Image (tube, rainbow, N blue to C red):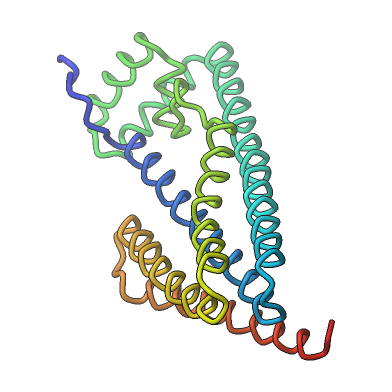
């Protein structure tokens, strides 16, 4: 049996790409909402452009670096777990190959193959590359494509930064009287896009996702703006 020669993504590869895209969309969404809430809150207290720029940049850098660090730690833990599982599987294949062959056969049977076909397939896969076969069928891991914490960290950093730039620019570029309205409209438009994108990537209806996304963003901006107005009025 010849293997396919085209480059279309299948199975785990496609799922991994969708997960990365979903993470990027959610990272951008976090950048939009958190930075918008911050700068709109400051705008409620003061109209000073330098204060708004300082607050927005601080929020952007703090948020993007926090996201990157958190993603690096999380994915590093996942990668360590994958490597430990592969090491254990390699040890079991060396110490009890018959039991591992039977285990692979049963896993293939659970996927719909008959006993005889599953046994033959398990034997052929074991002869070709036993560790790779068990990693993919039993563990759901591709030994050649372990999760990369640096890729995850950079992706989160860039996604959050891209999202945060929109409310930051929207609050500092317009004239004083237009800053908050322009920011709110821009943020709502961006949240519609990220809500629709996340829903489509998850194969869900976009309507509710968009409403939740926009509602959450408006709530965040409304609360922080109200607090900013109160603090500004109090002279804090």
- State the image coordinates of residue 107 (x, y, percent, origin top left): 38, 34
In the image, taking residue 161 as reference, residue 107 lies left or right, namely left
Q: Quadrant of residue 197?
A: bottom left
At 33% from the left edge and 16% from the top edge, which residue is drawn? 125
In the image, taking residue 51 as reference, residue 64 lies left or right, namely left
At 82% from the left edge and 90% from the top edge, which residue is drawn? 234
With respect to residue 98, does 140 lie above or below?
A: below
At 31% from the left edge and 65% from the top edge, which residue is drawn? 204
At 40% from the left edge and 39% from the top edge, which residue is drawn? 16
How many numbered discs sit on the rendered protein? Answer: 0
Which quadrant of the rendered structure holds the N terminus?
top left
Q: Residue furthest front?
A: 175
In the image, taking residue 160 as reference, residue 235 lies left or right, namely right
With respect to residue 27, does 110 lie above or below?
A: above
- State the image coordinates of residue 69 (x, y, percent, origin top left): 68, 43
- Residue closest to the eye, 85 or 24: 24
- State the image coordinates of residue 162 (x, y, percent, origin top left): 49, 51
- Residue closest to the eye, 69 or 126: 69
With respect to residue 105, does 38 lie above or below?
A: below
Q: Residue furthest left?
A: 1
- Residue closest to the eye, 160 or 165: 165
- State the image coordinates of residue 34 (x, y, percent, origin top left): 60, 65
Which quadrant of the rendered structure holds the C terminus?
bottom right
């Amino acid at each position: 049996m010849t293997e396919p020669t085209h480059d279309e993504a299948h199975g785990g590869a496609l799922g991994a790409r969708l997960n990365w895209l979903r993470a990027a969309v959610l990272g951008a969404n976090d950048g939009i909402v958190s930075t918008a809430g911050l700068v709109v809150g400051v705008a409620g207290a003061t109209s000073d452009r330098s204060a708004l720029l300082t607050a927005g940049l601080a929020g952007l850098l703090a948020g993007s670096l926090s996201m990157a660090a958190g993603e690096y730690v999380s994915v590093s833990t996942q990668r360590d777990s994958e490597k430990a599982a592969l090491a254990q599987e390699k040890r079991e294949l060396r110490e009890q190959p018959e039991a591992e062959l039977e285990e692979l056969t049963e896993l293939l049977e659970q996927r719909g193959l008959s006993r005889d076909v599953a046994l033959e397939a398990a034997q052929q896969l074991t002869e070709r590359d036993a560790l790779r076969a068990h990693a993919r069928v039993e563990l759901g891991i591709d030994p050649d494509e372990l999760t990369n914490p640096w890729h995850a960290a950079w992706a989160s950093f860039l996604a959050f930064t891209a999202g945060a730039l929109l409310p930051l620019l929207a609050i500092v570029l317009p004239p004083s009287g237009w800053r908050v309205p322009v920011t709110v409209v821009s943020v709502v438009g961006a949240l519609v896009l990220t809500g629709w994108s996340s829903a489509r990537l998850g194969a869900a209806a976009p309507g509710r996702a968009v409403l939740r996304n926009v509602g959450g963003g408006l709530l965040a901006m409304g609360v922080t703006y109200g607090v900013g107005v109160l603090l500004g009025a109090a002279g804090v």
